Image: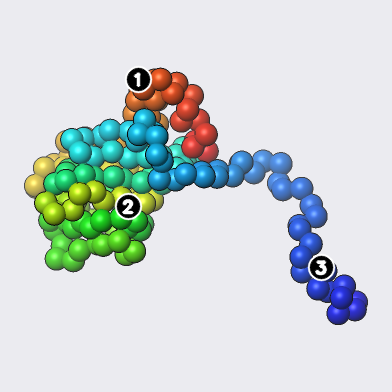
Amino acid sequence: MTKDDSKNEALMPYQLPFPKDALEEIVVANAIPEDERIWVPQAENVCFRPLCLNRSQGYWVNLLRVRKSGVLSRHRHPQPVHGFVLKGRWHYLEHDWTAAEGGYVFEPPGETHTLVVPEDVEEMITLFQVNGVMCYVDPWGKVTGYEDVFTKIDLCRKHYTEVGLGEGFVDQFIR
Ligand code: FE
C-alpha cells in the first residue's frame, strides 16, 4: 500500500451496511427551539424539550428549562443522571454547590434533591439524561409520584395535540 493509498483509505466511509436491526439515529437541528410549542410544560415555570425518549432502554434525554424562581419538586433517582448546563444557574436544596452555564453534573444513584433557580436568574436551560425513573417524594422519602420515559411520552403527546403539532410530533424522538 502506498502512502497515497493509506491517505485515501483514511477518508473512505465505512463500506458495509449497518446492522439491519439497528435503530435510526436522531438529529435535532434546533435543539433549543424557537417554536415555543415544542416546550412541554410540566410545572409552574418548568418545562422540558424532548430530544431522545428511549423506551427500549428506559431513559430520556431532554432540555429542562426553568424560569424565574421555578422549582423542580423533590425527587429521588434510583439510577444515574448526567447534566450539562447550557444557560443560567441552579442549585439543589440538598447540596452546597451551584451548577452554572458550561458546567457538568453527575448525579449518582441514591440522590434525592430539589432543583431551584435563584431569583436573579431569568432562565436556566440544562440538558439532562435521566435513567429509569424519578420518584417524587416528601421530605422523609415517602413516594408521592413518579416519572419515567412513558409518562414523558404521554405528556408530550397530550401537549403536542393541544398546541396543534399533533400527537405524532413526539415520534421522531422515540427509540
Ligand atoms: Fe434530579
Q: Quadrant of the N terminus?
A: bottom right
* Residue at the spot of label 2: 126
Q: Amino acid at mark 2?
A: Thr
Q: How is the image coloured?
A: rainbow
At x 9% / y 47%, what residue is drawn? 139
Using the rendered view, name the quadrant where residue 11 is placed: bottom right
In the rendering, at what x and y percent does residue 142 appear?
A: 13, 42
Amino acid under disc 1: Glu
Could you tell which of marks 1 and 2 lies nearer the N-terminus? 2
Task: Judge from the rendering whether residue 21 lies leftward or rightward of residue 34; answer left or right.
Answer: right
Q: Are marks 2 and 3 in contact (CB under 8 Å)?
A: no
Q: Secondary structure at mark 1?
A: helix
Furthest-front residue in view? 34
Mark 1 Cα within 10 Å, few/some/many (few <14, many 20+)? Answer: few
Q: Label 2 vs label 3: CA separation?
A: 40 Å
What secondary structure is found at the residue carrying circle 3?
helix
Report which residue position mark 3 lands on: 9
Identity of the residue drawn at 40% across and 39% down: 34
Q: Earlier in the sequence, mark 2 or mark 3?
A: 3
- Figure label count: 3
Question: Left of 14 or right of it: where is 108?
Answer: left
Q: Residues within 10 Å of mark 2 (few under 14, many from 20)?
A: many
Does any portion of residue 141 appear in the rendered image? no
Q: Tell which of 163 and 25 is nearer to you.
A: 163
Instruction: Name the residue that disc number 1 marks.
Output: 162
* Rendered residue at 30%/55% (across/down): 87
